[in-house]
């Protein structure tokens, strides 16, 4: 038991340090491409798309690798070591093409590192604590993002080489810590290589987990459209508030949604994981509909519900992958893959949809007053709500299979 909780502590440390180093590089790379290379906004969006596409590919590959190759700590060590090298190479990138290549490689390495860490974390704790442990893990990841932003604000006056060197050192620390992680030999729950082979294991997990994967894809797709960079623009233009007020609000929303995610994780651990999934779906539907109403309080409440849904679903889905699937490495790889694909598609769709639909509004009678609804978010909300309700119907049917066996 002491070994298991030491693994949890190591995974927590990796989440904090690794995400801090990653976030430190994001503004540095963005400013390099925009103000040194002079690239367009579309090219900047391509950086995000390439990263998530690469991560979705490597997530599936490493999920299968985790079931075949026993030395999981070595996989994490190699991934973080190469991550450190790539972080340093950004300082010597002489063109946008090289930056795009490095960003793609960074996405591949991210999938290899974090899927393996999440698998080890999930298998190191009993099911009764797994949801809350994953919730804390992702809380530390969010804290790492904030720490990375703060580090950049401190180092912004330094050269790009120094910023990349700091990120390099942070990933070297992660690589050293990963050597302390156990291999498959000391973690139970991963099937042997001859249980499920090749593509058949991936297809079997996809078929069994289709309801969960559909819900994850829809949630991440929608949130990447209205909750990414476009979310700042939408809130400013639709509510008429200043950028400073919007930024402060989103910071508060982030903190509250983290607390909500732990509460839903506790609900899943204590009572029912499916009940927690239904609650996440309800928060998503309610939040997406509220975003279309031209009332500042309701729009902010909608963002809070939407953010709480995403942050709660993230640890809950990892718990499902390490609890209800026989091929757990493939399951957690696919969970990461579909969320990354949703994020990539959302990043591509966001600007186009906003340009086409814009802030065109319609007026309705609501509570005896005239209320404007934004066409942009209303169309998205109705579409997403339909898919989410469909996913909930599938999840309702899925519960009988969960009780019978593991796939």
Image (cartoon, helix red, strand yellow):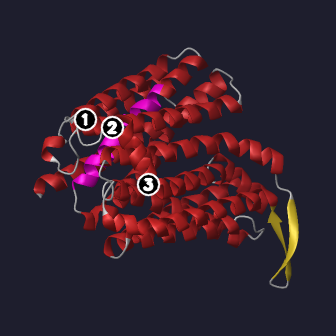
Q: Which residue is mark 1?
A: 68
Q: Nearer the viewer, residue 207 or 256?
A: 207
**115 within the magenta span:** yes
Q: Earlier in the sequence, mark 3 or mark 1?
A: 1
Mark 2 element type: helix
Magenta segment range?
105-124
Q: Position of residue 79 (x, y in %)?
A: 33, 30
Q: Nearer the viewer, residue 105 or 157?
A: 105
* Residue under the image location 38 percent in, 31 percent down: 166
* Residue under the image location 21 percent in, 51 percent down: 189
**Residue 209, which numbered label?**
3
Vertical position of residue 26 compared to residue 266: above or below: above
Residue 405 lies in quadrant: bottom left
Q: Residue furthest top?
A: 94
**Badge 1: few (under 14), some or many (20 or more) residues near its Cα, within 10 Å?**
many
Asked if the residue at tag 3 contacts the one at tag 2, i.e. Cβ–Cβ closer than 8 Å, the answer is: no
Q: Which residue is mark 2?
A: 64
Asked if the residue at tag 2 contacts the one at tag 1, i.e. Cβ–Cβ closer than 8 Å, the answer is: yes
**Badge 2: few (under 14), some or many (20 or more) residues near its Cα, within 10 Å?**
many
Vertical position of residue 88 compared to residue 379: above or below: above
Mark 3 element type: loop
With 294 as the anchor, is 123 left or right in this view? left
With 8 as the anchor, is 36 left or right in this view? right
Query: In the rendered view of the protein, which quadrant contains the N terminus?
Result: bottom left
> What kind of secondary structure does the magenta stretch mostly adopt?
helix
Residue 239 seen in this snapshot? yes
């Amino acid at each position: 038991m002491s070994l298991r909780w030491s693994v949890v502590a190591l995974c927590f440390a990796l989440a904090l340090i690794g995400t801090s180093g990653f976030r430190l590089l994001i503004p540095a790379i963005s400013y390099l491409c925009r103000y040194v290379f002079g690239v367009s906004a579309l090219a900047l969006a391509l950086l995000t798309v390439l990263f998530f596409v690469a991560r979705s590919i490597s997530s599936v590959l490493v999920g299968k690798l985790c079931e075949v190759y026993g030395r999981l700590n070595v996989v994490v060590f190699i991934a973080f070591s190469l991550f450190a090298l790539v972080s340093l190479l950004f300082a010597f990138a002489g063109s946008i093409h090289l930056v795009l290549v490095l960003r793609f490689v960074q996405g591949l390495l991210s999938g290899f590192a974090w899927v393996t860490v999440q698998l080890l974390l999930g298998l190191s704790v009993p099911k009764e604590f797994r949801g809350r442990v994953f919730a804390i893990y992702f809380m530390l990841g969010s804290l790492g993002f904030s720490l990375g932003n703060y580090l950049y604000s401190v180092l912004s006056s330094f050269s790009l080489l120094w910023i990349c060197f700091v990120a390099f050192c942070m990933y070297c620390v992660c690589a050293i810590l990963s050597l302390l992680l156990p291999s498959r030999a000391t973690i139970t729950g991963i099937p042997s290589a001859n249980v499920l082979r090749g593509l058949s294991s991936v297809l079997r997990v996809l078929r069994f987990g289709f309801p969960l994967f559909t819900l994850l894809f829809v949630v991440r797709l929608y949130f990447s459209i209205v909750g990414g960079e476009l979310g700042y623009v939408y809130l400013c233009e639709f509510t008429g508030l200043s950028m400073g007020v919007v930024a402060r609000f989103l910071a508060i929303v982030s903190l509250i949604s983290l607390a909500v995610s732990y509460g839903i994780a506790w609900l899943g651990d204590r009572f029912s994981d499916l009940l927690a999934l239904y609650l996440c779906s309800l928060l998503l539907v309610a939040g997406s509909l509220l975003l279309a109403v031209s009332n500042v309080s309701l729009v902010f409440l909608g963002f809070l519900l939407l953010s709480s849904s995403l942050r709660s679903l993230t640890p809950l889905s990892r718990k499902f992958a390490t609890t209800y699937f026989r091929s757990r490495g493939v399951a957690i790889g696919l969970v990461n893959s579909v969320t990354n694909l949703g994020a990539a598609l959302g990043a591509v769709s966001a600007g186009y949809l906003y340009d086409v639909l814009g802030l065109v509004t319609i007026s309705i009678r609501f509570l005896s007053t005239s209320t404007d609804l934004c066409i942009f978010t209303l169309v998205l909300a109705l579409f997403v709500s339909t898919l989410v309700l469909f996913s909930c119907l599938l999840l309702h049917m899925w519960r009988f299979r969960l009780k019978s066996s593991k796939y």
